Image (cartoon, rainbow, N blue to C red):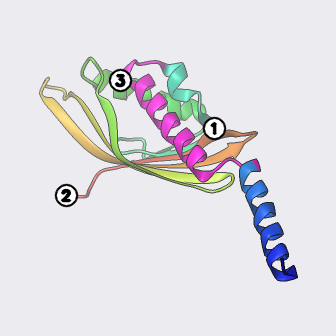
């Protein structure tokens, strides 16, 4: 075996060991997808602790209804009271077309969401909206740092 072949094989073996030691992006992407589904399930169940559990204490959220933005976990959680009051029961809160891009400790996810509620006159309203989340990994755990909900401009 030539020196060049041995060096190439050794370099490949080292690279393979390094890949096995770090979680694969697929593992991170799957963890973030599971986080989003767990959060959506908590919303459907009106489980406030489940809604907040994976959000950072300094979360920044941009939302469709006022307030335009919420900074910090307490302000973020306060937005759920009017949303859950508006929502029809059982609560509809689902996502599709979820896409995740994850690096070593920073990630973002996008999705299309659907929810439904009742307006002030009791008329059913359905809302399709966009979701973007910015996440950071701390001590092996993904945390939502930024959440942005939006609807197309009419």
Residue visible at 26% across and 56% down in the picture = 152
Residue at the outermost front position? 1
Tag of residue 84: 3
Packing grade of label 1 (10 A; few <14, some 14-19, many >=20) is some
| Residue 57 percent coordinates (x, y) | 65, 36
Tags 1 and 2 touching, CB below 8 Å: no
- Toward the right, the furthest residue is 3
Number of marks in the rendered image:
3
Q: Nearer the viewer, residue 31 or 83?
A: 31
Q: On screen, 65 above or below 50?
A: below
Q: Is residue 41 above or below residue 132?
A: above
Pick whichever of labels 3 and 2 is earlier in the sequence.
3
Q: Quadrant of the C terminus?
A: bottom left
Q: Which residue is mark 1?
A: 56
Q: Is residue 57 magenta?
A: no
The region drawn magenta spans 21-47
List x then y, in percent, for residue 137: 68, 45
Do residues under tags 1 and 3 come within 8 Å of each other at their CB atoms? no
Residue 38 visible? The answer is yes
User: Horizontally, is 86 left or right of 5 in the view?
Assistant: left
**Residue 79 in view (yes/no):** no
Q: Earlier in the sequence, mark 1 or mark 3?
A: 1
What secondary structure is found at the residue carrying circle 1?
strand
């Amino acid at each position: 075996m030539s020196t060049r072949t041995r060096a190439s094989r050794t370099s490949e073996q080292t690279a393979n060991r390094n890949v096995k030691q770090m979680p694969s992006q697929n593992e991170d992407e799957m963890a973030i997808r599971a986080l989003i589904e767990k959060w959506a399930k908590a919303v459907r169940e009106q489980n406030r602790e489940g809604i907040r559990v994976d959000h950072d204490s300094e979360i920044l959220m941009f939302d469709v209804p006022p307030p335009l933005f919420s900074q910090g976990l307490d302000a973020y959680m306060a937005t759920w009271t009017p949303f859950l009051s508006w929502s029809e029961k059982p609560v509809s809160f689902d996502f599709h077309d979820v896409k995740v891009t994850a690096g070593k400790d920073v990630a973002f996810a996008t999705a299309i969401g659907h929810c439904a509620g009742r307006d002030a006159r009791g008329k059913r309203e359905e809302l399709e909206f966009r979701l973007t989340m910015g996440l950071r990994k701390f001590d092996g755990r993904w945390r939502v740092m930024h959440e942005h909900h939006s609807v197309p401009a009419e």
